[in-house]
Amino acid sequence: MTDIPTSTDPSLKEEPVPRRFFQRPLVMIWCAALAAAVTFATFAEPYAPWAFKYPRAWRLELYFDGKFIELKNWISKVVDWLISDASFGLFTFTELTRGVSWIMERPYILAKSLLSTGFLEGQGSAAIQILPPLSWIAVIVIIVAMARFARDRKLAALVGACFLYLALFNQWSSAMVTLSSIVIAVPFGVAGGLLIGIAAHRSRIVKMIVSPVLDLMQTVPVFAYLVPILVLFGFGPVSAIIATIIYAMPPMVRITMLALKQVPGEIIDLGNMVGCTRRQMTWRVMVPSAMSSLMIGVNQVIMLSLNMVIIASMIGAGGLGYDVLASLRRLDIGAGIEAGVGIVVLAIALDRLSQAFASREPSEHREERPSALWRRFPYTAVCLAVVLATGILGLFWGWAQAWPAAWSITTGDFWSELVKYININFFDELETFKNALLLNVLIPFKRFLIAIPWPVAMALLGLAGYSLGGWRLGVLCALLCLFVASVGLWSKAMVTVYLCGISVMFACLIGIPVGIAAAERERVWRVVRVVIDTLQTLPSFVYLMPVVMLFRVGDFTAMIAVVAYALAPAVRYTAHGIRQVDPQLLEAGVVSGCTPGQLLRKIKLKLALPEIMLGINQTIMLALSMLVITALVGTRELGQEVYIALTKADIGRGLVAGFCVAFIAIIADRLITAGAQRARARLGLQ
Amino acid sequence: MSNILRHSKMLLGALALAATTATTTPVWAEAESQDPIKITLHDWTGQLITTQIMGEVLIRNGYNVEYVTADYIAQFAGLKTGDLHVAMEIWETTGRDAMDEATATGNVVNLGETGMQAIEEWWYPAYMKERCPGLPNWEALNDCAEAFSTAETAPNGRYLGGPVTWGGYDDERAEALGLEYEVVHAGTDAALFAELESAYQRQAPILLWVYAPHWAPVKFEGEWVDFPAYTAECYSDESWGSNPDAAYDCGKPRGPIWKVAWAGLEDKWPGAHALVSNFNINNDEMGAMVAAVDLEGRSVDDVVGEWMKTNENRWSTWSQ
């Protein structure tokens, strides 16, 4: 990765004869900088102790109420002020947020009544059911009918099987609670994302404000903003839904912006010619023609919402996420896996369904429409009939309303026994392997990173930014670095970089070869895709506890969890990159007598490099987003800082640590994106 | 919630109303609000049992109850604003700071002890006693440091402490008592007991933080290490105890599990306030119920129902 910036030099283009490697100016600057850095890190400690431990007196302080206080306390104070004092004249800030949550609660209650609790009169334990919820049969019939309508029988069978799993493994009632919050969070996320995206497309100022906010929304760990949300929006499922929306919306905004930009100019010209108003232009011309790209955003919102199920259950969403947490607290691994797989099948069903709706060909208009309503809308008619029939049947036979527990199956002790078997028979081998890796790779790398003085890291990152993307990027990297040091979290940030770095390295070592192997073999790819999809949607908590049993708590266990989760993009982007290599170039390679090995190294990998780098970029982002989970197995980094702040309800501390994580992500993202762009330019791909 | 589901087979409201009144015969608490009293549920079984017992008692006294799942510490934000009303288990050992902070605002009140005592201490499985005969006396720990060590910590022993968020001063304790042990922190309660389960399956050495009431000391045979008993001076006064230059040279405090409520509870539901204040249950009962759920696989509803039946003479006096 590092040889790309050093070996490409802008001056190359002007000079026909390339200079020798070590004579290029940037390479010389880098060599000098590295030498200076090593000298400084080795000898400067007695003369400049401030470079090795950031002095407390230099911490970032802000003004509040007559004096300067540390940033984290400042944030806490400001939030306190918002809650207790802030007012817009007619109403207070708290009343505003509570109003928002009241509005959002209405559709949620409706969805929950329909799917889970039934329609109730009154509240709490005194509530009386007026109408039962949709029966399990009705829900399955509706979802199958939707799949059949959207695509074909095959999809209908898949979706039906997914929902049948939920019933069969006795996950139905929890799954319906989860589903009812998802069906609220997703439309809000999609609509919100679409509107913000359109606004940003229309106005440069909005775009300038939105872009950095999106970066933060995607990279600040969720735990960091849970407490402020709880305080502002009240306790309960609505807060969980709002947290889900914040987490799941950014891709929708980004994709909207991108999709609108890509609408062909001819279509816009046509719109102008027929005299569209601005509103008509947006809703009648731009949005419909960008629809297929927009649906990718919808799909992302669904997947990310399901990723949030576990965390949402920690603040009162209940459902499948709560089942996973509770079963792992009593170390019932089997029950944890069953509930976790429940989340996966829900994700698969909703994902495939949304994709099918996205790519559905509108049926041609038929001239003569059948007169009978039920023939004109056969699917709706069947669904309504089943809803009514099972509703009435359910009054007399319980099984028609609620899935009877006696029909359920379970894997029981199988998983616990499996882990026990591995534990008893292979623990020593695993331990030896772990210790070898820990002592020879992980710990030396950690020591090395912690030993780097912060001004050196700042200077080197600044230089990297400059050589990849110009002085603006250099200044940005250096400033973000300075922020991390100035809030007193430098060493924790370095441990974060170590844990993520080592995990990303392993994820790439595994993921890139798998991606290469799967790229051109359709069958292998199908298997690989199922595996990586599952790893991404299965809550990591499910496999974290068995891993703890086999590898004890600590960095190694955390690393396994991060690698498992962050593997997917490395595989996906590599495969994608290799597949899109121009076949003519490959043919040229074959004609000029390349061996398969040469073909791979000299042509495919080189041309796929920008894609692979974007894959690594995504891997880093996912690794950073796993930090909060790794804190649960006892790592000592920024994720732990966020987690401590959460359990102590310390808003400022959590947000500051969250910003540090976000800034690390932003530095990595900007550097790699700039690198990938240069690589693209060099290869003549753009 | 389960109550609602139990009645979920009725279609007509009137019918359901008749059925509810007939089966539970509530003594409608007169003149008190029929808004639901929101009680928090957390993610450990003991707390679910305590809370559901309280909930059942309130319901049978004619109150409207709603269970809300909430985080142990984050719930204080809700209790302060009145979004939540009652929290049944705040442990002296882990929740004291958050509770004190909340009660200091005047919006949250402490409604006294639940009757259960939290025990938290260094714990080892029974088979380790053979390998380290001096136990449970803490002074034997140093002789066995080798036996409790792993490759990463050798020659020091390895002690698995609770999540850093639990506090507990274990690093300071090891230092003050001169224990040759490395303190490793688990990130969560689940990770802590996953390691115990793993070690127990292999009969491998382990020394860790265990607390009661919990299913672990019921499922696994073992003992708590005997440290010099905790006193307040031990934590505050360096000269106290065997190490004259350091605090924390003693065991962990044992203390009650508290009930807390939103300050407005007493005005809005005075009767419920009395019921919650009088709630009382002990460690042995709770240990047995937790084991019935987590180890025998019975449902919480079932276990709570049984307790309600056999202890009717007890909970019926709580309203006074």
Image: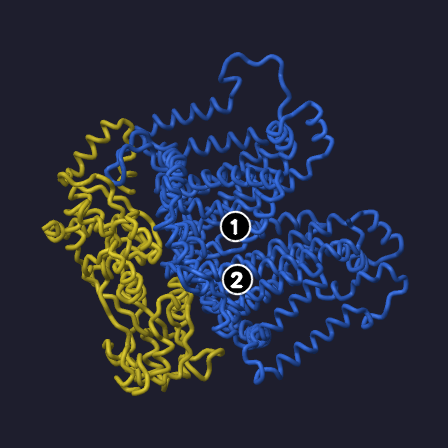
Quarter where residue B195 is shown:
bottom left
Q: Is residue A407 visible?
A: no
Residue A660 tag number:
2
Residue placed at 69% from the left, 23% from the top? A274
Q: Nearer the viewer, mark 1 or mark 2?
A: 2
Quarter where residue A413 is shown:
bottom left
Q: Is residue B184 left or right of residue A602?
A: left
Residue A273's place in the image compared with B61, above or below, is above
Q: Is residue A231 visible?
A: yes
| Chain A, chosen colour in render | blue
Q: Amino acid at mark 2?
A: Cys
Disc 1: host chain: A
Distance of label 1 from label 2 (alpha carbons): 26 Å
Spot occupied by residue A166 in the image (x, y as percentages of width and height): 44, 42
Disc 2: host chain: A
Spot occupied by residue A383 in the image (x, y as percentages of width and height): 46, 26
Spot occupied by residue A230 in the image (x, y as percentages of width and height): 38, 50
Q: Can you tell which chain is drawn yellow?
A: B
Residue placed at 26% from the left, 72% from the top? B253
Q: Are marks 1 and 2 on the same chain?
A: yes
Q: Amino acid at mark 1?
A: Thr
Residue A537 tag number:
1
Residue B254's place in the image compared with A468, above or below, is below
- The way the protein has been coloured in the rendering is by chain
Q: Residues within 10 Å of mark 2 (few under 14, many from 20)?
A: many
Q: Residues within 10 Å of mark 1 (few under 14, many from 20)?
A: many
Residue B8's place in the image compared with A513, above or below, is above
